[in-house]
Amino acid sequence: MLSLGARFYECTDDEGKSVLVTKFRTRFEHQSYPGRTHGGITSTLLDEAIGRSVSIPLPHAWGVTLDLNIKYKKPVPLDKDLYAITWTTKITSRVFEGEGYIVDRDGTVLATACGRYMQLDPSKISPEGITAENWFYVDEDLPTHIDIGGDF
């Protein structure tokens, strides 16, 4: 599968809550029905973004998905600017929970999700460790606000 080229940004929403905003664009290779992104790609993106959102309150936390619930609201189009907005809702010593949604440039909600993740030491997630070479971090040149509908 080709990469979505997703970029992750720590931002503040209109209510002052810290959120992780993910900018991406799906392509033909991510298609299910003609002109629509496959639901598995949509689910994968929400899972990844929610799992990464814990890095806002806990910068060194890593997690593995325990469960994920997706609701598909509208078809997710191909070759359009899309955004996932996610945040952590609960953190305990071993588990964290989060939720989020995918929107288009107009702010229309296309899919929503909530999930639970087990916190694990990075060496237990990946035997070779997690490094900048084998995993994408939250963008270091991060803006504090993403203009939904703005240019990529």
Image: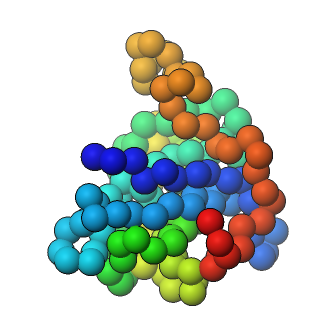
All told, the count of numbered labels is 0
Residue name at image x 20 percent, y 68 percent: 32
Report the colour scheme: rainbow
Q: Nearer the viewer, residue 68 or 76?
A: 76
Q: Is residue 35 left or right of residue 142?
A: left
Q: Residue at x 81, y 68 (%)?
A: 16
Identify the residue at the far left of this view: 33
At 33% from the left and 47% from the top, the residue drawn is 2
Q: Quadrant of residue 77?
A: bottom left
Nearer to the camera, 42 or 151: 151
Q: Is residue 50 above or below residue 136?
A: below
For residue 17, side relative to residue 75 (left or right): right
Asked if residue 107 is positioned above or below residue 83 in the image, the reply reads below
At a point 34% along the width and 63% down the height, the residue shown is: 27
In the image, residue 47 lies at what x, y percent?
A: 42, 53
Drawn side of residue 22 relative to residue 113, left or right: right
Where's residue 63, x and y in %?
49, 36
From the image, which quarter does the C terminus lie in? bottom right
Q: Position of residue 142 (x, y in %)?
A: 76, 51
Q: Position of residue 58 (x, y in %)?
A: 70, 38
Report if residue 34 is visible in the image.
yes
